[in-house]
Image (cartoon, rainbow, N blue to C red):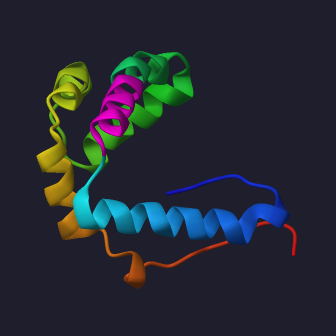
Amino acid sequence: MTTSVKTAATAKAIGEVLKELGAMAKGGVSAAELELAKSYLSASVSGWFVTNAGVARAVSRLFLHELPLDFWSKFPARVKAVTRAAVAAVAKKHLHPSRGKVVVVGDG
């Protein structure tokens, strides 16, 4: 997870991020949050291929993660099929905010 905030807001932003991760780990996301995320991801895929750098990133991810060549063409439909139950299961399995690391970069 990344964020960009002013130096004075860093501590509060970290607290909010950890709170959100904790909430996700306990129960997933709301229906509205999931729909917003799915809409954003589904609609943004085409924009990832606008520049040569974007195409290179997308293609390199196929090879880095050993994904099939049709991965990006099927991505929007797969995102739209994600359920709240699936998000909750993955969050419970993989999100452990208390074991995470916080890295802050910026003005002291």
Q: Position of residue 107 (x, y in %)?
A: 87, 68
User: Farthest residue toward the bottom?
Assistant: 99
Q: Is residue 16 above or below residue 66?
A: below
Q: Position of residue 3 (x, y in %)?
A: 62, 53
- Secondary structure predominantly adopted by residues drawn in magenta: helix
Q: Which residues are magenta?
A: 30-41
Q: In screen coordinates, is 95 left or right of 1?
A: left
Give the residue displayed 19% in from the left and 55% down from the top: 88
Q: Position of residue 44 (x, y in %)?
A: 43, 22
Q: Is residue 72 above or below residue 96?
A: above
Q: In screen coordinates, is 46 left or right of 2?
A: left
Q: Is residue 34 magenta?
A: yes
Quadrant (top left, top right, bottom left, bottom right) of the C terminus: bottom right
Q: In screen coordinates, is 100 left or right of 62?
A: right
Q: How many numbered circles does the render carry? A: 0
Of residues 69 and 41, the one nearer the viewer is: 41
Of residues 74 and 86, the one nearer the viewer is: 86
Q: Quadrant of residue 27?
A: bottom left
Q: Position of residue 8 (x, y in %)?
A: 84, 65
Q: In screen coordinates, is 13 left or right of 55?
A: right
Q: Is residue 44 above or below residue 67?
A: above
Q: Is residue 63 above or below residue 59?
A: below
